[in-house]
Image (cartoon, rainbow, N blue to C red):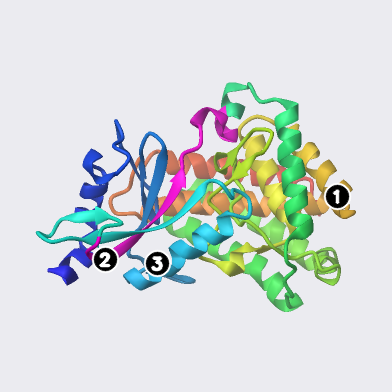
Amino acid sequence: MICGMRDDIGGKVTFLASLGAYAERPTRVETIETHYSWVFLTDRYVYKLKKPLRDDGFDFSTPEARQRNAEAEVLLNRRLASDVYVGVMPLTLEEGHKLSIEGNGVVIDWLVKMRRLPDERMLDRRLARGDWHYADVQALADCLAKFFAKAGRIKTEPTAYLARFRAECQASRDAFHSDGNPGLQDAADYVVRCIEAFIRRRHDLLLQRLEDRRIAEGHGDLRPEHICLGSAPRIIDCLEFRADLRALDPVDELAFLAMECERLGVRSIGPVLFRSYCRRTRDCPAPVLITFYKAIGALIRARIAILHLREKPVRDPEKWPRRAAEYLEIARRECRHLGL
């Protein structure tokens, strides 16, 4: 029975979606399914249960692996949201085959527990409503500049660094030729050609980032929906399960966030981010480098969008081609400013 419950993701989700699962006795539980997790939102807290998946670069297939990942998620995310990540909680099987959070029975899985942040203060919501304030963005910019100034540097081989960008191009080309319509395929091909041409012609600019020891242990997924604005901003949901994808140029991370803000209709946030970063780190990247990072970041997000069509079942199948087209248009726009 224990072995069966270890693998019964449906039973765990049903239990965690119920009001009685939680000691704080919430008035409601909202359940959200993501690509990698099930997320349960109560009045005050968020509980995350990883799906038992395994793929290139990560392994959540066993309870032990999910425990290690949960512990890494808490540790890494406390860098930018120290008071949000409560800790790792065991999901236990009690007598009578009843599930419990932090019970005395046999541990069959693990949860990450977080304090719930106010939805209305998340950056994506503030941008959508148009009620963001310069002071909040400046606080965010200062927070990120401090984080990147102190982040541990990562030694990266030049060949591997350039190969990483080329691999993103190839993966994106393959994804759109497999799952995209002809219009998306043509747009992706154009963006890939431009990015590959930039890597060939301006590899010196990219490799200078390595010589200057700029590659750092970053966040890896710096999107507006992961940022809670305020005088002390909180930034959550880093890419905890892929250390290689957290090894980034801070300019890449900031360009990605600026690109996402522009997608949501606000172009004035990027300059604020970079002013604080340059002042704190004395790193003043060439504008064309920022443009390159925006282009490849948009291409990657377009690929992630179109790959949702491979899910079974596909959630909201009409959404993902539209989202991919939106990102590809951003990438095309940035490519036109690469000076090729």
Kindly check if marks 1 and 2 are in contact, taking CB atoms under 8 A apart as contact.
Answer: no
First to last magenta residue range: 104-125
For mark 2, give the secondary structure: strand
Mark 1 crowdedness (10 Å alpha carbons): few <14, some 14-19, many ≥20: some
Amino acid at circle 2: Ile
Residue 230 is situated, as x and y percent measured from the top left of the image, at 65, 33
**Distance CA(mark 1)–CA(mark 2):** 46 Å
Relative to 299, 72 lies left or right: left
Q: Nearer the viewer, mark 1 or mark 2?
A: 2
For mark 1, give the secondary structure: helix
Relative to 155, 219 lies left or right: left
Residue at point 42% right, 50% down?
A: 113
Choose the circle earlier in sequence order: 1 or 3: 3
Which quarter of the figure is the N terminus placed in? Answer: bottom left
Q: Which residue is mark 2?
A: 108
Residue 228 is situated, as x and y percent measured from the top left of the image, at 59, 37
User: Which residue is at the front of the view, 303 or 282?
Assistant: 282
**Distance CA(mark 1)–CA(mark 3):** 36 Å
- Is 64 within the magenta? no
Amino acid at circle 1: Arg
Amino acid at circle 3: Gln
Quadrant of the rendered structure where residue 46 is? top left
Quadrant of the rendered structure where residue 131 is? top right
Q: Which residue is mark 1?
A: 280
Kindly check if marks 2 and 3 are in contact, taking CB atoms under 8 A apart as contact.
Answer: no
Residue at point 62% right, 36% down?
A: 263
Residue 315 can be seen in this image = yes
Task: Check the image and report above or below for 157 versus 280.
Answer: below
Residue at point 60% right, 34% down?
A: 123
